Image (cartoon, rainbow, N blue to C red):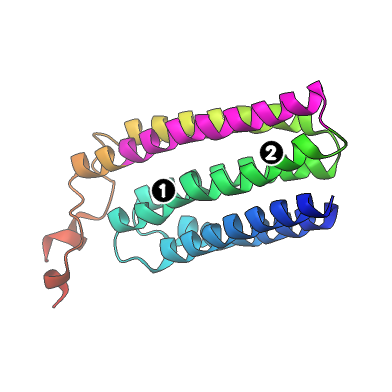
Amino acid sequence: MENVILYSGIALAVIMAVSLYRTVVGPTILDRLMGVNAIGSETTVLLIIIGILYRKVDMFIDIALAYALLNFIAVLAAARYFHKKKGLYDENENKDR
Amino acid sequence: MIVLTVIVGLLMAVGLFIFLTAAVGMIRFPDFYSRLHPAGMIDCMGVLLTMGGLALFALFDGGISLASFLNFAKIVLIVVFIYITSPTATHAIIDAGMRAGLQPWTKKKDM
């Protein structure tokens, strides 16, 4: 039974690497923000998988809850920070269209 | 015991499939706004299915007791929390994008 959860945890880690690509490459800053948001919620799932594997579920559930909270606040703060800032994407990319 | 393995395995498999399709969607979609759709899928369906499988496993593993029921309730609360906050976060990102003037991608523009 444990190895079902173990293999799904490994698969989740690989999928997080795939969505890391968008965070690294993403042309605009908002793409990176979206990639970090996606990785954040995948990490919450991964934390609980690790909790089950280490047989300390109740400790890791609290960690995952705190992580989900922080992920939400971080994305909100970053979105609010880029509200007015002009350097969000390179202006000339959209001007010529 | 076998039934638990099958159910949890099935839930995790479908959840991971949704994570995979969302990750591929985030890479292939043409524009920031269209990429937000698969990113939203991760936060909703993917988390619901995978956490549902883990919650069932936490509940039924080693017999149902108060402790395992508390674990189950906490995992359900995490899913409810993610269901409330992730659309808000996506909305905040879109708001920042629209205010900064990022134009959505349209097909005829590229022709």
What percent of the width, then of the height, locates residue A64? 65, 33
Asked whether residue B111 is in view, the answer is yes
In this picture, residue A11 sits left or right of residue B5: left
Q: Which residue is mark 2?
A: B55
Q: Residue at (78%, 57%) from the top-left corner? A: A4
> Circle 2 — which element?
helix
Q: Nearer the viewer, mark 1 or mark 2?
A: 2
What percent of the width, then of the height, locates residue B17? 56, 62
User: Which quarter of the image is occupied by the C terminus of chain B?
Assistant: bottom left
Q: Which residue is mark 1?
A: B40
Relative to the observer, which residue lies in front, B86 or B109? B86
Q: CA distance from mark 1 to mark 2?
A: 22 Å
Residue A24 lies in magenta, yes or no?
no
Asked whether residue A70 is in view, the answer is no
What percent of the width, then of the height, locates residue B78? 58, 31
Q: Amino acid at mark 1?
A: Gly
The stretch of residues the image draws in magenta is B64-93
What percent of the width, then of the height, locates residue B69? 74, 26
Q: Amino acid at mark 2?
A: Ala
Residue at the limit of the structure toward the bottom, as seen here: B111
In this picture, residue B9 sits left or right of residue A71: right
Q: Residue at (12%, 70%) from the top-left corner? A: B109
